Amino acid sequence: MVEYSKDQLLSEILKAVSDTTRRSLLTQLCQQGTSRVTDLANLYAMSLNAISKHIKVLEKAGLVARRTIGRTHWIEPRLERVKWVEEWFTELKSIWELRLEKFDELLKDGGTQND
């Protein structure tokens, strides 16, 4: 099994959810719960093969898991890795908050302070 860094996995997650169909599939799975691939495919105007390719991208990112029972493939949402996206956005937000606080301080000082 290939080991990925957290940064690589974050990239895989963001790439996976960059597509409208994959976001829709993930939303559908979260709303409806575990679903058969064929049932998911019936919701979209595309082939079963195309839906399967989208699901494989979501699987690679760890956002869904597949269980096979007989000839039926069941897809279930796995959102544990979404926390990494949340953490990354939280980091970005804190950086911007610090910058805005510094900017606010500069404005209050009247811009007369030299670095």
Image (cartoon, rainbow, N blue to C red):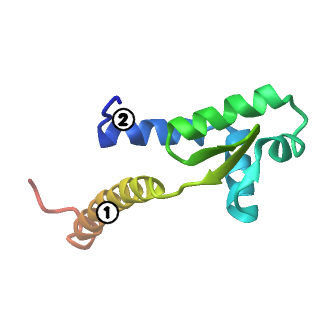
Mark 2 — residue? 8
Residue 30 or 23: which is nearer the viewer?
A: 30
In this picture, residue 62 sits left or right of residue 46: left
Q: Which secondary structure, mark 1?
A: helix
The quadrant of the image that shows the N terminus is: top left
Residue placed furthest toward the left: 115
Residue density around tag 1, few if under 14, some if 14–19, many if 20 or more, within 10 Å = few
54 versus 114 height, above or below: above
Q: Which secondary structure, mark 2?
A: helix
Residue 33 or 83: which is nearer the viewer?
A: 33
In this picture, residue 108 sits left or right of residue 67: left
Q: Residue 74: x percent and y percent? A: 70, 47
The kind of residue on which mark 1 rests is Ser
1 versus 76 height, above or below: above
Mark 1 — residue? 94
Instruction: Tell me which label, 1 or 2, sits earlier in the chain.
Output: 2
Residue density around tag 2, few if under 14, some if 14–19, many if 20 or more, within 10 Å = few
